[in-house]
Amino acid sequence: MGSFSIWHWLIVLLIVMLIFGTKKLRNMGADLGGAVRGFKEGMREGEKSDAPAPQVTGKTVEGEVRERSEHKA
């Protein structure tokens, strides 16, 4: 069973062209290229905006306050 020969691939290409037509295949190729280009641009923009996040001092504790007390130093 190895890989297909060039003749097999040419027959598959001919059948695909007959089913979809060259115009539809060209449009699908252009759409795919545009999607890849948009993905690459998005990745570049994501790298540029990956500035270090501001550091937050202090702690956030979730819970319920039951009574208020004064802290004396």
Image (tube, helix red, strand yellow):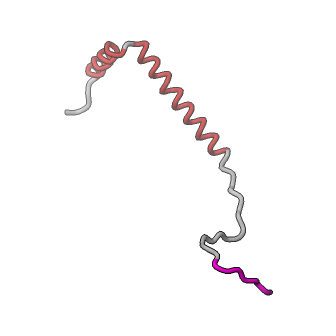
Residue ID at (52%, 30%): 35
The answer to whether residue 59 is left or right of residue 15 is right
Chief secondary structure of the magenta portion: loop
Work out whether 56 lies above or below 64: above
**Percent coordinates x, y for residue 71 in the rendering:** 76, 84
Residue lying at 79% horizontally and 86% vertically, measured from the top left = 72
Q: Looking at the image, which residue sits at the far front? A: 67
Is residue 71 part of the magenta span, yes or no? yes
In the image, residue 72 lies in the stretch drawn in magenta: yes
Q: Residue at x 62, y 40 (%)?
A: 44
Residue reaching furthest to the bottom: 73
Relative side of 1 to 67, left or right = left
Placement of the N terminus among the 4 image quadrants: top left
Is 2 in front, or is 70? 70
Q: Quadrant of residue 61?
A: bottom right
Asked if residue 44 is positioned above or below residue 64 in the image, the reply reads above
Q: Is residue 12 left or right of residue 37?
A: left
The single residue placed furthest to the left in the displayed view is 1
Q: State which region is magenta.
A: 66-73
Q: Quick check: 59 above or below 68?
A: above
Q: Nearer the viewer, residue 67 or 28?
A: 67
Residue at x 67% of width, y 71% of height: 59
Nearest the camera: 31 or 64? 64
Q: What quarter of the picture does the C terminus occupy? A: bottom right
In the image, 63 versus 29, the foreground residue is 63
Q: Position of residue 41 (x, y in %)?
A: 60, 35
Estimate the x, y position of residue 57 in percent, counting from the top left: 72, 68
